[in-house]
Amino acid sequence: MADLDDFQQLRRLYLSDQYRYQEARYKERQDVTDVFWRSKFAFAMYGVGNMDFDDRELKLLKGMLVETKMDQYSKAVKDAVQEVVHLLQNEGVMDIKDAAVIDPFAGSGNLLFHVAQVKLPSDRHPRADGYEIDRRVHAVTANNYELLVDSRINMHLQNSLVAEPLAIPEDHLVIVLVDPPWRDAWCRDDDPTSSDMSLDHTDPPVIDIISTFKTKYPRHVESHRLMFVIPFPQKTTEESVARIVTEHHLHPLTFRERILRGCDFGQEILIGLATSPAHDSAV
């Protein structure tokens, strides 16, 4: 019977360069993850007690083995962000020495963890900040990040939409990960039988999230250094995606680019720079 020490040794092994992000090891890591989540050590390993989590919280946290369970979705988003950042640098759009990644809905922290591994043209990694309003989910995720040797991630127990803006220098590229809960995103208002999804129906709506962060970081909008990363299911309506671009003057760097292939659920991504109407033609 495995004990806590066994799991901690496996964790250290999977953190090593020998294992990290190697596709050939994916099945092995997933098997360990499944065993781990059936054990009494699932929370002790992250420095918290076995709290009385509800089903929604457990569903969130089951993805939190960020460095052992290969998260193909999060890694695909990270790869897309890294490609765009280097394109901006190489095309002379902006000089990117430093950046900050913000996840307004961090949850288990998988997406933020992976995007925080982006290597900037300066060979630096971005600072990273995540927000979570559930106290118990925040405790587990924050403790998990603390255990990661190379973690540069700050977790905030706050509602990201009403929190004060972070002190981010104006020459930094601010990258906002817009991946809110999709539980109400079905297009029920338009057609009760529709299987399509809408960025207007996420909780909160994507368009409101973008508006809030443009208000929080106006100087970065003016200098075209506020970038939104919006992953979404392939079945999302084109109208709701286009509305994000037109109503918020979002200059798309990718538009409905497929980031996951060969999956039952197609995943796409929109990455764009926030602009103001007066500056649209300058980007």
Image: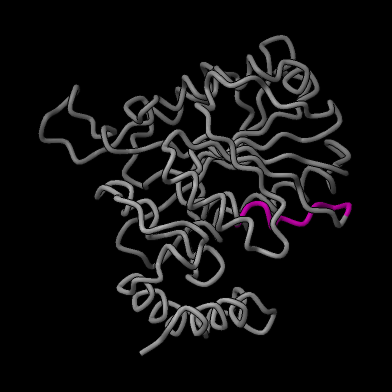
Seen from the viewer's position, the closer of residues 281 and 147 is 147
Q: Main secondary structure of the magenta part?
A: loop
Residue 174 position in % (x across, y down): 72, 34
Q: Image height check: is 276 above or below 75? A: above
Q: Residue at x 51, y 49 (%)?
A: 257
Structure colour scheme: one colour
Q: Residue at x 70, y 54 (%)?
A: 83
Quadrant of the snapshot with the N terminus? bottom left
The stretch of residues the image draws in magenta is 114-122
**Res. 143 image quadrant:** bottom right
Where is residue 134? Give x, y as percent. 41, 37
* In this view, 127 is above or below 76: above
Looking at the rendered structure, the number of numbered marks drawn on it comes to: 0
Q: Position of residue 162 (x, y in %)?
A: 54, 18
Kindly give the residue lying farthest to the top in the view shown: 278
**Residue at x-position 62% and y-position 78%:** 12
Q: Nearer the viewer, residue 8 or 212?
A: 8
Which quadrant does the C terminus fall into?
top right
Query: On screen, 139 above or below 213?
Result: below
